[in-house]
Image (cartoon, rainbow, N blue to C red):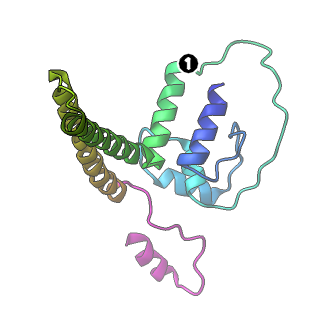
């Protein structure tokens, strides 16, 4: 159940090129290895980094056999950590979700305030004390979540700029001398 949820969520919100059934084993070229090794990130997904690198990939489907001996070492805690690491490393969706929830809460608060005032003015419905408290709570909480989402966006962009991922990956250089390659590598 976890793999299906994980791969579906990753494909939808983080790495669109993740294979539908996920990845168990991979055979990669030296260029891919060098690229992934050059990225000095911690708490990330090796599968995500390989997919992120953008090299051409071919999927080989196979039927996975049942385990004959032992039990899986993938505990629930490790699975949850992989899920969180993948989303923190490759998706800004959680930050946008925080802002969206904040906007929805604030809108609910304003609509509820309008409903209370409308009922009081046109139908003489007495206003209970908890109603104003609910309005204040919804509006303030929603506004705080919106600003938290905005701060999160700034932090995400800062995090994205300071990561050790290369801005681009050079597949090969044509027409450059060895000296030019050294200069390009040092920049």
- The quarter in which the N terminus is drawn is top right
Q: Is residue 155 left or right of residue 92?
A: left
x then y, percent, for residue 133: 17, 27
Which residue corresponds to the image point at 60% horizontal and 19% vertical from the top-left?
73
Asked whether residue 47 is in view, the answer is: no
Q: Give the residue pinned by disc 1.
A: 75
Q: Is residue 158 left or right of residue 179?
A: left
Q: Nearer the viewer, residue 21 or 152?
A: 152
x then y, percent, for residue 66: 81, 20
Q: Nearer the viewer, residue 157 or 144?
A: 144
Magenta residues: mostly which secondary structure? loop
Task: Give the farthest residue toward the top.
Answer: 70
Which residue corresponds to the image point at 38% horizontal and 71% vertical from the top-left?
186
Which residue corresponds to the image point at 34% horizontal and 59% vertical from the top-left?
161
Compared with 94, 35 (above or below) is below
Task: Give the farthest residue toward the front.
Answer: 123
Q: Nearer the viewer, residue 152 or 169?
A: 152
x then y, percent, for residue 108: 32, 39
Compared with 164, 20 (above or below) is above
Give the magenta range.
163-187
Q: Nearer the viewer, residue 65 or 110?
A: 110
Q: Is residue 41 left or right of residue 61?
A: left
Asked if the stretch drawn in magenta spans residue 157, the answer is no
- The quarter in which the C terminus is drawn is bottom left
């Amino acid at each position: 159940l976890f793999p299906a949820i994980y791969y579906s969520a990753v494909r939808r919100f983080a790495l669109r090129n993740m294979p539908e059934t996920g990845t168990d084993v991979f055979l990669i070229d030296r260029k891919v290895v060098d690229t992934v090794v050059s990225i000095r990130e911690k708490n990330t997904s090796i599968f995500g980094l390989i997919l992120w690198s953008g090299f051409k990939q071919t999927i080989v489907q196979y039927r996975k056999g049942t385990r004959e001996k032992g039990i899986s070492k993938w505990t629930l805690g490790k699975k949850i950590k992989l899920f969180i690491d993948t989303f923190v490393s490759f998706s800004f969706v959680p930050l946008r979700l925080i802002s969206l929830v904040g906007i929805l809460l604030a809108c609910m608060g304003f609509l509820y305030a309008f409903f209370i005032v409308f009922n009081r003015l046109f139908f003489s419905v007495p206003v209970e004390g908890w109603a104003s408290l609910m309005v204040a709570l919804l509006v303030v909480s929603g506004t705080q979540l919106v600003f938290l989402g905005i701060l999160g966006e700034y932090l995400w962009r800062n995090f994205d700029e300071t990561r050790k991922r290369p801005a681009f990956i050079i597949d090969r250089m044509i027409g450059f001398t060895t000296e030019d390659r050294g200069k390009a590598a040092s920049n």
